[in-house]
Image: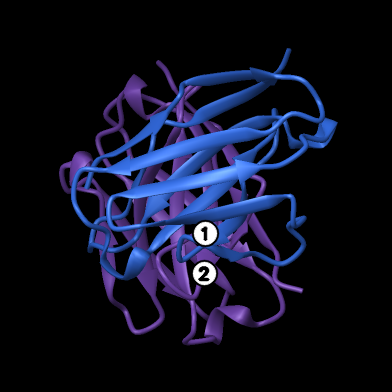
Chain colours: A purple, B blue
């Protein structure tokens, strides 16, 4: 059973870099079938696509993030990572890790809360 | 592609039918359109992919349809567990996007 578990610092200061990880269960991370996806949700708002990475290394990021996002896969740790630079209060929200055979979220983690505040 | 969902909110009673719309600003290639349901305090879950293909475990009172720019999610005979926020998302372009969501609330 594929399970995803996000983790992160919880609180980040403005202008700093946010780093999140998504732990992938049962060696699914080595499966070339999947896109690994990050999605976020600001408090009381809708879903926002951040980007995706495929095991082939191909990445895609939402242009609304203005080049601040980057993703990577560490197969030795069964982890997918998200880095978001120069954060502001607008980056506060619930961050989800997800995956699917295409850029759609067939499976979701429970999410990790991020607050940007000094 | 901009996705516009309507209505913003549906207030219905259990047993009633819900009809949700998702309209795209341009044709979605291969009808790569999905529907998710999100309940309060939970992660969303996939309901339909490729517009009309039901995900595993989704009851058949849910149906997804549409093509091109107009897509519909119908829930026949609402059950108490069906209420929540529903989002559509397209992946027909290199930049996937979400609709703003429709809240189905209990009247």
Q: Residue B85 placed where, x, y %?
A: 59, 31
Q: Nearer the viewer, residue A118 or B62?
A: B62
Q: Residue at x 34, y 84 (%)?
A: A56
Badge 1 marks a residue whose secondary structure is: loop
Q: Considering depth in this image, is B64 or A47 the residue closer to the camera?
A: B64
In this rendering, is residue A47 above or below A50?
above
The picture quadrant where one finds residue B38 is top right
Q: Disc 2: which chain?
A: A
Q: Is residue A104 left or right of residue B105?
A: left
Tag shown at residue A105: 1
In front of the other: A96 or A115: A96
Would you identify the image quadrant in which residue B100 lies?
A: top left
Q: Residue at position x 17%, y 48% from top?
A: A67
Looking at the picture, how far across and down is residue A22, in whole percent? Answer: 56, 59
In the image, residue A99 above or below residue A78: above
Q: How many neighbours does mark 2 have within 10 angstroms: few (below 14), some (14-19), or many (20 or more)?
A: some
Residue drawn at x 28%, y 50% is: B69
- Residue at the spot x=56%, y=35% of the render? B19
Q: Tell me the residue that label 2 is attached to.
A: A100
Give the image quarter of residue A90.
Answer: top left
Tell me if mark 1 has few (under 14), some (14-19) or many (20+) residues whose alpha carbon lies within 10 angstroms of its own: many
> Do callouts 1 and 2 mark residues in contact (Cβ within 8 Å)?
yes
Along the line of sight, the residue nearer the viewer: A109 or A118? A109
Disc 1: host chain: A
């Amino acid at each position: 059973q594929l399970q995803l578990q996000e983790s992160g610092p919880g609180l980040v200061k403005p202008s700093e870099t946010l780093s999140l990880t998504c732990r992938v269960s049962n060696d699914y991370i080595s499966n070339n079938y999947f896109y690994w996806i990050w999605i976020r949700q600001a408090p009381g708002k809708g879903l926002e696509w951040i980007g995706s990475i495929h095991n082939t290394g191909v990445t895609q990021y939402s242009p609304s993030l203005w080049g601040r996002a980057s993703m990577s896969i560490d197969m030795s740790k069964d982890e997918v990572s998200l880095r978001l630079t120069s954060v502001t209060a607008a980056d506060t929200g619930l961050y989800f890790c997800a995956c699917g055979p295409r850029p759609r979220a067939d499976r979701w983690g429970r999410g990790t809360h991020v607050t940007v505040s000094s | 592609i901009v996705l516009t969902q309507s209505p913003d909110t549906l207030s219905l009673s259990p047993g009633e039918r819900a009809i949700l719309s998702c309209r795209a600003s341009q044709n979605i290639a291969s009808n790569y359109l999905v529907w998710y349901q999100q309940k309060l305090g939970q992660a969303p879950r996939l309901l339909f992919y490729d517009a009309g293909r039901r995900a595993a475990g989704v009851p058949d009172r849910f149906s997804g349809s549409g093509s091109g720019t107009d897509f519909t999610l119908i829930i026949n005979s609402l059950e108490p567990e069906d209420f929540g926020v529903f989002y559509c998302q397209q992946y027909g372009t290199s930049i996937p996007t979400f609709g703003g969501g429709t809240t189905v609330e209990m009247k």
